[in-house]
Amino acid sequence: DGGITQSPKYLFRKEGQNVTLSCEQNLNHDAMYWYRQDPGQGLRLIYYSQIVNDFQKGDIAEGYSVSREKKESFPLTVTSAQKNPTAFYLCASSVPTSGENEKLFFGSGTQLSVL
Amino acid sequence: QKEVEQNSGPLSVPEGAIASLNCTYSDRGSQSFFWYRQYSGKSPELIMSIYSNGDKEDGRFTAQLNKASQYVSLLIRDSQPSDSATYLCALAGNQGGKLIFGQGTELSVKP
C-alpha cells in the first residue's frame, strides 16, 4: 500500500541531545513537509521540500534541521538548540502544483518528549 | 491578526443536529481551502476541499466558501458521536504547495 511512514511513534530526548525523526513515502510525491503540533493547537510548518536536494524554512525552523537526499525520504533532526521540543510531529507529502493538487497526505506522527 | 482563525471550542451539539464550523483568513490571495478532521493522538485526515465561491456537498458534509468575506465554513448534517474530533481549517496561497492551518475547533457530539 502507498503511504507515509513515520518512525518512531514515541521518542524521548535527553537534554543536550540531538534526535532524528524518520519520514519515508512511497507515493512518488515531489513535496514533503514537517509540521509541529502542540496540545490544543493547529499545525505549524517547520521545513518543507519541493524537490530533491532542496528545502526551505517554514515558520518555526529554529532548532531544527532537515535533509532531502532522496525523493522518498525527508528526515527531521531536532537539535539541542530547540529548547522546547515536546510536541507531536507530523510529516506530510503532496504533489506541489497549484490548484487542486495541494492535498496533504500525513504520516501517523511522532510524539517527542523531553526526559 | 492570525492568518487563519477558528474558534477553539469546544462546540457541543446533540446527535442528529447540524454542526457549523467557521474559519476566517487574512490572505486574499488564498486559492485553495481544506477541512481536516483529527482524532485525538492521530494524524489529520482530509474530509473536504473547496476552491470556488459557493457550496460543495459530499455526503453529510458541506463546505461553504466566500472569498469576498474571507471565510470558509463546514456544515455537518445529522451529526454522529463518531464526528467528535478536532476540525482543522487550512488554506494554500497562489504559490501552491504549503498549507497554513488554523488552531482547530473541537467538536463534541452528545448521544
Image: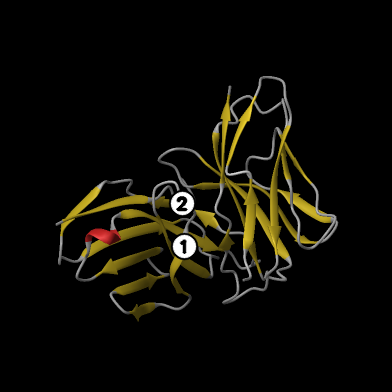
Amino acid at the residue labelled 1: Glu
| B69 and B30: which is toward the camera | B30
In the rendering, at what x and y percent does residue A59 appear? Answer: 63, 44
| B35 and A20: which is toward the camera | A20
Residue sitting at x 19%, y 66%? B18
Q: Is residue A19 above or below residue B107?
A: above
Could you say which disc has been placed on residue B3 in the image? Answer: none
Q: Is there a contact, CB below 8 Å, between mark 2 and mark 1?
A: yes
In the rendering, at what x and y percent does residue B73 appear? Answer: 34, 65
Q: Is residue A9 left or right of residue A66?
A: left
| Chain of the residue under label 2 | B
Q: Is residue A34 above or below residue A13?
A: below
Residue sitting at x 76%, y 62%? A72
Label 2 – label 1 distance at C-alpha:
9 Å
Q: Which residue is mark 2?
A: B42
In the rendering, at what x and y percent does residue A15 appear? Answer: 67, 19
